[in-house]
Image: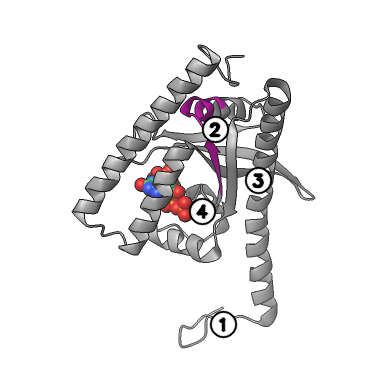
Amino acid sequence: MTTDEGVASFSPDQLRAMRDEFQRFLLEYQFGLREVETKLGILRDEFLQMHDYNPIEHVSSRVKTADSLVEKVIRKGVEPSFDAIRAAITDIAGIRVTTSFTKDAYRLFDLLTAQDDITIRAVKDYIAEPKDNGYKSLHVIVEVPVFLSTGRVAVAVEVQFRTIAMDFWASLEHKIYYKYAGVVPDGLLTELKDAADSAALLDARMERLHGQLHGPGAGPIRAV
Ligand code: 0O2
């Protein structure tokens, strides 16, 4: 509703309805996260049980805050409707899976995305093709079905797979980027790129050592 002065005005009931609709919108993403977290938890527990090996070091998840979502809607010029936001913003629900080794990141990606209730919407392989700043991580947007009292909805969840070394680098880079409000001094950018190269060397070395310890094709995450 708009007043004569062009100011939007809402009744308390309308405001409550808008709040409920927004909460319900975000709730679907909470449920989507839960589904994917359960799948990852099952894979981890099965590996531990069957192979005495845990391919997952750490899993963290979050639903975007309302502030961060609104900022992205404005930045991307998305029409402010739930349908348009659902279609355009695919990282409202996000999960980060940290692994010891690069091959575990790919294997977990394969095992998750091969499940027949999972649909892949997009993949960005920044491990094979790191960003110019050195960022490495394997990103996939999946759709997972969530069954509500009103029926089935497909929820988009962004899953990022990365090693501990990649994660260490990314969290430091993120802090630096925010500290300098996106305008990072050139010297620091060069150091960050150097650090990313060192992290990649460490990953390769640790994976080689792991292979020597357990024999070729080792690990836990062998071809099945
Ligand atoms: P947060 O707080 O982690 O959610 P877009 O998501 O549309 O802005 P794009 O290109 O579609 O950008 O997505 P992309 O490349 O898949 O990257 C999305 C997420 O990956 C980011 O989410 C970061 O989490 C991570 N990421 C991508 N590039 C970098 C990078 O250079 N450094 C670090 N540290 N993380 C990166 P958000 O929304 O930016 O942040």
Q: Amino acid at mark 2?
A: Ile
Seen in the picture, residue 56 relative to 27 is either above or below; the reply is: above
User: Is mark 2 in CB contact (under 8 Å) with mark 1?
Assistant: no
- Point out the residue furthest to the bottom here: 5
Magenta stretch, residue numbers: 94-107
Q: Is-magenta flag for residue 6? A: no
Q: Does the beta carbon of the residue at mark 1 sit less than 8 Å from ligand 1? A: no
Q: Is residue 131 left or right of residue 190?
A: right
The numbered dot on residue 9 is 1
Q: CA distance from mark 2 to mark 3?
A: 14 Å
> What colour scheme does the image use?
one colour
Task: List the residue tagged with mark 4.
Answer: 84
Q: Quadrant of the N terminus?
A: bottom right
Task: List the residue tagged with mark 2.
Answer: 120
* Sequence order check, earlier mark of 1 and 4: 1
Image location (x, y in percent) of residue 33? 64, 46
Image location (x, y in percent) of residue 130? 34, 35
* Sequence order check, earlier mark of 1 and 3: 1
Q: Residues within 10 Å of mark 1 (few under 14, many from 20)?
A: few
Q: CA distance from mark 2 to mark 1?
A: 41 Å
Residue in view at x 36 percent, y 33 percent: 200
Q: In the depicted view, which residue is nearer to us: 137 or 94?
A: 137
* Sequence order check, earlier mark of 2 and 1: 1
User: Is mark 1 in CB contact (under 8 Å) with mark 4?
Assistant: no
Q: In the depicted view, which residue is nearer to us: 89 or 112?
A: 112
Residue in view at x 46 percent, y 83 percent: 6
User: Is mark 4 in CB contact (under 8 Å) with mark 3?
Assistant: no
